[in-house]
Image (cartoon, rainbow, N blue to C red):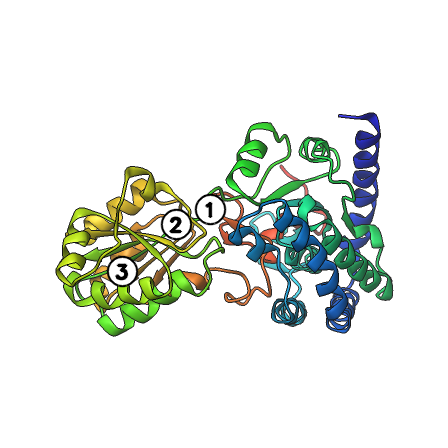
Amino acid sequence: MSSSIKKMMQDIGKRARSASRAMARASSEQKNQALLHIAKLVREQSAQIQKVNQGDIERAQSGGQDAAFIDRLTMTSKTIETMALGLEQIVSLEDPIGKISALKKQASGIELAQMRVPLGVIGIIYESRPNVTIDAAALCLKSGNAVILRGGSEAIDSNTVLAKIIQDGLAAAGLPTDAVQVVATTDRSAVGEMITMNEYIDVIVPRGGKSLIARLMAEARVPMIKHLDGICHTYIDADADIEMAIKVCDNAKTQRYAPCNAMETLLVNKEVGSQVLPTLCKIYQDKGVELRVDALTRKTLEDAGFKGLVDAKEEDWQTEYLAPILAIKTVSDIDEAMNHIERYGSKHTDAIITNNKVNADRFLREVDSASVMVNASTRFADGFEYGLGAEIGISNDKLHARGPVGLDGLTSLKYIVMGHGEIRT
C-alpha cells in the first residue's frame, strides 16, 4: 500500500470520527431535514444522475461485465424514485437514538434502564450498486452515525454525484458534511486499509460478491455485519394452494434475477409435483429460465412433454446464480425439504407454500434463516418491503443484527443508571 493511500484513509477516518460525535447529538428534526433535502435533490437531478450512470454502464459493458452485473449497476427513473421514496420512508420512522427502555427500580434504590445509541462510524464496502450510496448514507444519518462509503470502481462516477447530493443535504441541515464520505480512489489497497482501521471505524458492512466478502472475512480487524450467499429456497408443500404456489414461485424467481433474495432452488413435494411443475416450468421456460432438475423432477416434466432440461449436479444446490437459472428438486415430505435447506441453504431467506398450519409452524420454527416466510415470495426480504425505509444490507449472522439491517441494526444499547445518592454496601 502506498503511503498516500494510507494517509488519505487515515484522514477520512479521523474526520468521520469527529463527525460521529456531532451526529450522535443531532436532533431528529435536523436529520429529517437533511433526508428530505436529499430526496428533493435526487428527484431534481434524476436526469443528471442517469447521464453520469450511463458512463459507468458503458465502461462496464466494454470491460465484459455480464448482464446481472449491468442490472445491478443501472439506475433508471424508477430506481431513482425508489431511492427518494426510501429516504421519505426513513423520515417517517421513529428516531431510535436516545430512546430509553426497560426502566426499573432496583432494591438498592437506583433506577436502571437501557438507552439506544449510535454505533459510531460505519464503513460500507460495496460493488456495482450505486443506490447503496443513498440507502446506506440515509440509514446511517438517521441512526446518528457517520459513514465511510467505498463503492466499486465500476460505479465511481455515479457514487461521486450521489455523494455530492448527500453532502449538500447535510450542509442544508447544519450537519457536518464529513458525516458521509465517499472514498474517491479506485485503488484496491484503500479497502485493505479501511478494514483494519479499528481506531476510527466501529463496524464494516460489506455488500458485494462472494470473493469480496471472503477476502474481508480473512483480512478484516474491524467487526462486520455481513452475509456471504443468498441461496434462497421455496418449498411447495403437499397441502399448498396450487394456483398460489405457481404465482408466488414465478415471482420469487423471475421478478428480478440479480437480487440476493431471488429464489435459487425450488423444492416440490412429490404429491403435488404433477399438478404444479408442468404449469410453473412452462412459465419459467417461456421466460428463458434454464431448469436444472433432479431425476424425479425430470420424469414429471418429461411425462408432460418438456425438453431442454439440465441434470442438476451437486454444485447446483450450492450455487447463488443471480441469473435466469433455477435448481428444482422433488422431495418426499417437509422433513426432506428442511434437511435440504439445512444442508445447502445460506441462512438468508426461505419460504414454504402451504395451507397446513402445523407444517407452516414447523417451518417457521425449524428453518434457521434470517427471514422465514409462509405463502409469500422470497423477494419481500428487503428493508424497503419490511418498512425499514431501506436497508444497509442483509445479515445472516446471529449476533447483533439479523435479516435486513435497518435503523435498529445500526445502533447499540447502553445501560444508564439514575441514582439518588445510593451507595453499595
- Give the residue at mark 3: 361
Residue 297 visible in the shown view: yes
Q: Quadrant of the N terminus?
A: top right
Mark nearest the camera among 2 and 3 is 2
Q: Residues within 10 Å of mark 3 (few under 14, many from 20)?
A: few
Q: Earlier in the sequence, mark 2 or mark 3?
A: 3
What residue is shown at x 45% (from left), y 56% (from top)? 261
What residue is shown at x 53% (from left), y 36% (from top)? 211
Q: Amino acid at mark 1?
A: Asn
Q: Nearer the viewer, residue 332 or 23?
A: 332
What residue is shown at x 64% (from left), y 48% (from top)? 62
Marks 3,1: beta carbons within 8 A = no
- Give the residue at mark 2: 369
Which type of secondary structure does the marked residue at label 2 adopt? loop
**Horizontally, is 420 left or right of 341 in the view?**
right
Q: Nearer the viewer, residue 238 or 34?
A: 238
What residue is shown at x 85% (from left), y 55% (from top)? 176
Residue 103 visible in the shown view: no
- Give the residue at mark 1: 396
